[in-house]
Amino acid sequence: MERRKFITMLGTAALTVPVMGTIASCAPVPEKFEGHKFPELGYDFNALEPYIDALTMELHYTKHHKGYFNNFLTATDGTELLETPMEKIFENINQYPAAVRNNGGGYYNHALFWENMTPSRQEIPALLKQSIEKDFKSLDTFKEQFSTSAKTHFGSGWAWLALGRDGKLFITSTANQDNPLMNISGVNYGVPLLALDVWEHAYYLKYQNKRADYVDNFWNVINWETVNNRLTKAKNL
Ligand code: MN3
């Protein structure tokens, strides 16, 4: 795409103001956006052992995630997207070049993923537990359905728990670096609450072809506090 045409499209996109007021009509955005930043990893590379090995974590964070971040900056260099929160960019992602979609998604999705894992085991906070039980009948049913989504997603992608516009939780999976905030066909809209990377680079060193074992072990490292906080923010819109 010609650069001028791309920038003109960005200008048009900025005029599209989403309608607010309904539950989860759009994603929570930072109150004060201070530019795109490569996020800190909140724990050591070996902190999630034995479920996720240190070498995988190090390569995943310093090479894959950093690569998406750097390529996103290159793809948006000189445009107003550098001043736009990712949640707003995703609302109009179908108008931007593939490099913005793929690398912006990779940058954002991994930040969510690191945050929704922790080395310290946690109880599920009440709000989240009640919401899961309401929409999936039980925690076990939810885990089973999420696991199935992650295990059966064909090829590279992500499994998600998200909050839909109707105020209900749902499970979905997306291809490549897409996510439920993107306005593209085939993606169900929702505010992401829990993300699981099912690209082979996320597990192959330790689990090889056994993605199912990686998915089963994911339940040992979930930061339920973070997931609950995301739900609280999304419901307060
Ligand atoms: Mn990844």
Image (cartoon, grey):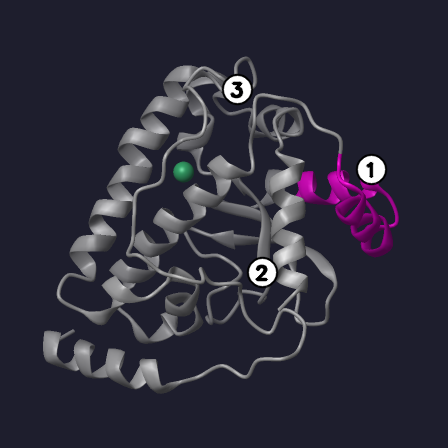
- Residue 42 sits in which quadrant? top left
User: Disc 1 designates what residue?
Assistant: 140
- Residue 88 sits in which quadrant? bottom left
User: Disc 3 designates what residue?
Assistant: 48
Q: Is residue 34 above or below residue 212?
A: below
* Element under disc 1: helix
Separation of residues labelled 2 and 1 (CA atoms)? 22 Å
The reply to whether callout 2 and callout 1 are in contact (CB within 8 Å) is: no
Q: Quadrant of ligand 1?
A: top left
Residue nearest the observer in this picture, 213 or 90: 90
User: Disc 2 designates what residue?
Assistant: 191
Q: Is residue 163 magenta?
A: no
* Element under disc 2: strand
Residue visible at 68% across and 63% down? 235
Image-based side of 70 in relation to 145, left or right: left
Image-based side of 50 in relation to 94, left or right: right
Q: Is residue 117 above or below residue 39?
A: above
Judged from this view, the residue extending furthest toward the front is 32
- Which residues lie in the magenta part? 124-149
* Element under disc 3: loop
Which circle's residue, 3 or 1, is located before the other in the chain?
A: 3
Q: Nearer the viewer, mark 2 or mark 1?
A: 2
Q: Nearer the viewer, mark 3 or mark 1?
A: 3
Instruction: Locate residue 217, reporting x and y percent.
Output: 63, 24
Separation of residues labelled 2 and 3 (CA atoms)? 26 Å
